[in-house]
Image: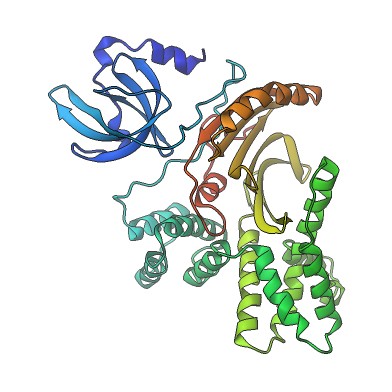
Amino acid sequence: MNLWQLIQSKVPESMLNKTSLDNLSLAPGRVFKAMVTEQLHGALFAIQKGAVSSKAVIQGEVKVGEEYLFQVKKDPKGLFLVPTEKIPTVPRALPIQVEAKTGGMTPARPPQTTTPLQTTQERIQAIVAQKGDNIPATTVKELVAVIERLPATEKEKAIEMLKVLAKQNGITNIPDKLQMMIGGLSDKETTIQTLTKVEASLQKITLPTPAQEKLMEVIQKMQQPQTLHTKAEALQFIRQAVTLLGLDFEKGLSDLIRQGQPFSEGKLEQLKPLLMNYLQQVATLEEKAAVTQLISKLTGFQLLSREEGNLHHIFIPIPIKMHEETKDWYVHISSKKKNEMLDPDYCRIVLMLDLPVFSSVMVDVFVQQKVVSVSLHHSYPSMEKLVEKSAPLLKESLSVKGFKLSAVKTEWREHEENDGVPVDFLKVILTPNEKGLDIKI
């Protein structure tokens, strides 16, 4: 039993009707869906609604690990819940504790969503205010228009992108920049699907230039099916994908300037500079749209890498083709700087994998002083059992390398069709870590 479980097990009778339903912004009469995660004492339960956990008195029969539709009711003692219908879905996995002692670290979890009572305009103004800038009313109006015409899930994604832009680039031309990021990071097509469009355009050219031939070569390399059976194969593939994408192209140019070398020495060998070169030569609007779409996506990927104080934030997109199906995987690494390199002893790695059997899985790994905690957010029914069986092997493998496994946690979430970079992944990688997860030396 960990410390939190010990505290919960000692809840006195006097606290039975003192719930924390206010954390969920609920009013009497409202109906919402939540999972019962633990029975604390008598009719007092822990429940989870989305990413928000709370305590509530429940009047009626419920089972831990099941989801229900609850109606909020009120009596002289306070708010309580009444289950109205059991949700016919697969139960979410509850946390699997490998060890009771976690070294003071809490496994990472997605941050709570912003209250729906806050308007888009208020959220935009709050983002800009945090940076300490003033933003013209016309710019706010334009940003509201950009965001409000999006579907609900894309609105949340746009807000997260806006936070990045305001912090990294200031408010200059921010509506145009935001539209570019939305177009790139909310693209319905995978990177490889867009690459095939550009390839088809290139194939129409009778006498291609050397740069166009090189672009065709890069595109064909990126579309080769992968067999990631071994660690060596996986590392080689990731190195090749990152190199071919050209995500460090601008850095290479700045290095040339700093070293006083001519731009002519910046060879056209990576996807982004080759696309920018080809964009000047495309003949039709359709071809131009495909090339522009791909450049916007790559630029959006680049903006997700940043520096904050003594921390590096590295974003790595991985276009992949497996079993003739194209996918986009994403890796985000937050690490303390150590001689201008990433420090493996103080880092957080978040992976978003779209797998053939398991579907979408987000793996959140936090490392501090060689103590590792792992959290998996998934929609695969049997994931909890698989993780429970594999945890001892993971613990042993890490021990051999000098690391200690603190905890493994699985969290079930509903699978949602989400174009581009998933919004829950964006929130995790763009929001500062919770207390206990902050990388401090």
Residue 25 visible at all: no
Name above or below for residue 426 compared with residue 432: below
The type of colouring in the image is rainbow
**Residue in view at x 56 percent, y 23 percent:** 96
In percent of width and height, residue 262 lies at 84, 75
Quick one: quadrant of the C terminus? top right
Camera-side residue: 258 or 56? 56
In percent of width and height, residue 188 lies at 55, 64
In percent of width and height, residue 129 lies at 41, 55
Residue 406 visible at all: yes
**Residue in view at x 82 percent, y 41 percent:** 231
**Residue in view at x 46 percent, y 32 percent:** 91
Q: Quadrant of residue 291?
A: bottom right
Name above or below for residue 144 compared with residue 394: below
Q: Is residue 273 left or right of residue 364?
A: right
In percent of width and height, residue 184 lies at 58, 66
Q: Is residue 287 left or right of residue 138?
A: right
Residue that lies at the very extreme toward the left in this rendered image:
76
Camera-side residue: 362 or 249? 362
Camera-side residue: 364 or 369? 364
Camera-side residue: 34 or 367? 34
Total marks placed: 0
